Amino acid sequence: PPLDEILNLHDFEETVLPAKAWAYYSSASDDEITIRENRAAFQRVWFRPRILRDVTSVDWSTTILGCKSSLPVYISATALGKLGHPDGELNLTRAAAKHGVIQMIPTLASCSFDEIVDAAQPGQYLFLQLYVNRDREITKKYVQHAEKRGVKALFITVDAPQLGRREKDMRMKFVDDGAGAKVQEGQSDVKKDQGVARAISSFIDPSLSWKDIPWFRSITNMHIILKGVATPEDAILAYESGCQGIVLSNHGGRQLDTSRSGLENLIDIVAALKAKGPWPNPNFAVFVDGGVRRASDVLKAIALGASAVGVGRGFLYAFSSYGQEGVERAIEILRDEFEMNMRLIGARNISEIVPEMVDASALRSH
Ligand code: FNR
């Protein structure tokens, strides 16, 4: 459909993508139970709106890890943008620049890291997602280069010592058509005939452990965030090991199937962190991703303690079908939804979104 008939982020998902892109982007692991749960969990949280608060002007802008953002949403890293669109990740970079949104660059981007940074506007904020290479020298160079080029935060993916089995994707043989061609040298290890995900990911180091965190601290001054935390135990370890935050994420349902949604884990994790230190903690941020398609989803996560939320597939599908304009439209849709929903729940700014504005009693007992 023409772009102006796209009314919400779900609509982008209904558009037709090239078969291989659809297989890689939409797939999740095993029986795809977690990916469904990511959406379902948001539907178990209900609003408790407050009334009569003069919501003439509402402001949904915020600061994410010290970086100004026009939305409490960042673009999460999704690999291989060129499977969906010839401009790949640059669609995200350009749209993000126009609308003041932060993009997290994936290690396995189709465009090279420098192409993406070169496409950014001066002062535009970028984060970097890191898959840690078995050869730590490659990782060290990559991280230090990113810092030199102005990247503000390093999101180390910790839920993927091995990539999950995404069977939809595995049934589609990997044929190198250039989508992954610019993947960082030494960061790709292409083996044909086993699906896109497995073909590009065998460089990832499964030996990564808590002992490595001080090493990351020693090679960079960027904020270090662990992406893919699922339990209070690990949230506390991340906090105590000197990280600046965590993403409660199950990798969009693409890793361990039947793991809980980030939203559902949020309540227990926030409770555990509150017991350990100040809350909200200016030195430790909690993010959530997985299944976010509406501003109302984001408001629920914020009410329960998240400082911002990541969106993966929503933007991926948007640029696959409509390029940069699609991403811009997705951002505008979210912006309009924030305005309306904040008025309707009675919050004039992000700090007025409080736990009492949601009824989360239908989430797992805690
Ligand atoms: C991802 N995600 C991901 N995460 C990561 O740390 N490194 C990566 O290379 C990728 N690649 C990737 C590819 C595709 C096609 C998808 C859909 C996802 C996970 C991503 O950052 C995020 O956690 C999820 O996408 C969030 O869920 P939604 O928004 O897609 O439902």
Image (cartoon, helix red, strand yellow):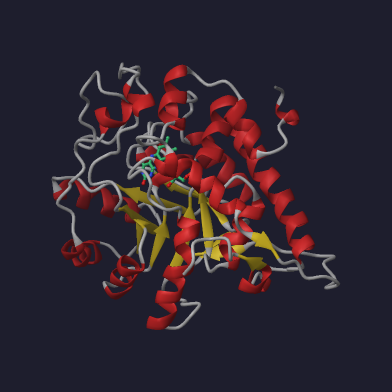
Q: Position of residue 60 (x, y in %)?
A: 67, 61
Please tell me which residue is depicted at 63% across the width and 39% down the height of the picture: 9
User: Where is 322 relative to 45, above or below?
Assistant: above
User: Where is 345 relative to 13, above or below?
Assistant: below
User: Where is 19 relative to 266, above or below?
Assistant: above
Q: Is residue 279 at all visible to an observer of this figure?
A: yes
Q: Is residue 325 at all visible to an observer of this figure?
A: no
Based on the displayed image, in which of its 4 quarters is residue 347 positioned?
A: bottom right
Q: Quadrant of ligand 1?
A: top left
Please tell me which residue is depicted at 34% across the width and 31% down the height of the picture: 166
Based on the displayed image, in which of its 4 quarters is residue 28 positioned?
A: top left
Please tell me which residue lies in front, 124 or 196: 196
* Quadrant containing the N terminus in the rendered view: top right
Q: Position of residue 343 (x, y in %)?
A: 79, 62
How many numbered marks does the figure carry? 0
Q: Position of residue 65 (x, y in %)?
A: 47, 65
User: Where is 64 relative to 196, above or below?
Assistant: below
Please tell me which residue is depicted at 83% across the width and 73% down the height of the picture: 53
Instruction: Answer with left or right where residue 130 lies relative to residue 36.
Output: left
Q: Position of residue 134 (x, y in %)?
A: 14, 45
Instruction: Answer with left or right where residue 363 lies relative to residue 161.
Output: right
Please tell me which residue is depicted at 49% across the width and 66% down the height of the picture: 365
Please tell me which residue lies in front, 130 or 262: 262
Instruction: Answer with left or right where residue 54 lies relative to residue 318.
Output: right
